[in-house]
Image (cartoon, rainbow, N blue to C red):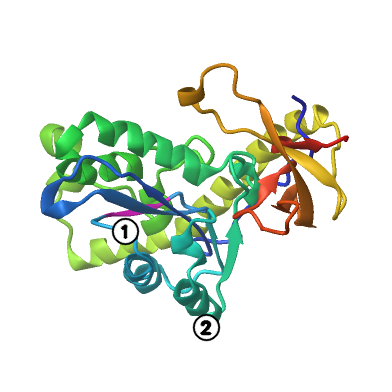
Amino acid sequence: LAPPKELNTLSSPWPFTWWGMDILGPFTTGLHGGKYLIVGVDYFTKWVEAEVIPNIADVTILRFFKKNILARFGIPQAVVTDNGTQFTDKNFQEFLAAIKTKQHFTSVEHPQTNGQAESANRVILRGLKRRLEEGKDKWVEELWSVLWAYRTTPHSTTGETPFRLTYGTEAVIPVEVEELTWRTTQPLSNEENNEAIREELDLIEELRTAASLREASLKQKVAARHNLKVINREFEVGSLVLRRNAKDTHHGKLTANWEGPYRVRAKTDHGGYHIETLDRKQLPRTWNAKKLKQYYS
């Protein structure tokens, strides 16, 4: 099925200004009753913050945001989440409004509506989930190594490690301790150390600019390929539509592919729609045009 809308790419203007947040799980109950993983991803550096949590209550989500994002990296300009009740909770939204952080939502089953050519946070989350599932009930203990590997591996879109884009230098990795490099063997005087720090600081802005340009170029290429396939499809407010049915193996192959009709209640930018039943009951979340089609009686 051809995409109904052109892809609008999103680039964070500087580090730690745009964050994506999501929740993974439930996993097998791990250490200290941990069942879920909450993850925050910085769109610029691709730095990941993650924490094991026993529940997904709104207070737990807000505490993670304050401790792992706000206290460490400052007030972000925007946060991208799905429409889960934890993220649409009044307390969470009021706190974001108080610090003037905008909240953007992804459409159901269509993370591209957050504006990225490829949603970086979703890719990262899928990779984390695969790694963590291999640990089974030991996944809590495995988390630190998953984060370490991710933070010290060059990202495909920036060409740099999240660690370097965040701190301005590469992390000392185990191979440097085993094989001995100048960073682990050469003692530096205070003067030499200060000079090394100045050199790193001089390079960091140049490094971040180059990484940003590389990512923007890649996103433009992906968007161009996507947009060649677009067949524009829009629905007017008040029109009737069918919604693609979610796959449900419990009802066998004869389950209808589409259900409805529903009425279009409102539309958002980039192909998102709020829909409701014919008796005015609004469905939660937004739905992408790719998952809807016109209903003809």
Q: What percent of the width, then of the height, locates residue 168?
A: 39, 56
**Hey, which residue is sitting farthest top in the picture?**
253
Q: Is the magenta region chiefly helix, strand or loop? A: strand
Residue nearest the observer in this picture, 138 or 168? 138
Q: Are marks 2 and 1 in contact (CB under 8 Å)?
A: no
Residue 68, can we see it? no
Residue under the point 62% across and 33% down: 245
Report the amino acid beneath label 1.
Ala
Residue under the point 19% across and 33% down: 136
Residue nearest the observer in this picture, 46 or 26? 26
Q: Quadrant of the N terminus?
A: top right
Region in magenta: 47-52
Q: What percent of the width, then of the height, locates residue 227?
A: 79, 33
Label 2 to label 1: alpha-carbon separation: 40 Å
Question: Viewed as shown, does residue 150 lie left or right of 158?
Answer: left
Report the amino acid beneath label 2.
Ala
Q: Which residue is mark 2?
A: 98
Q: What percent of the width, then of the height, locates residue 282?
A: 66, 58
Q: What percent of the width, then of the height, locates residue 42?
A: 47, 55
Query: Dot 2, crowdedness within 10 Å: few (<14), some or many (≥20)?
Result: few
Residue under the point 79% across and 52% down: 264
Q: Which residue is mark 1?
A: 196
Residue nearest the observer in this picture, 239 or 130? 239
* Callout 2 secondary element: helix
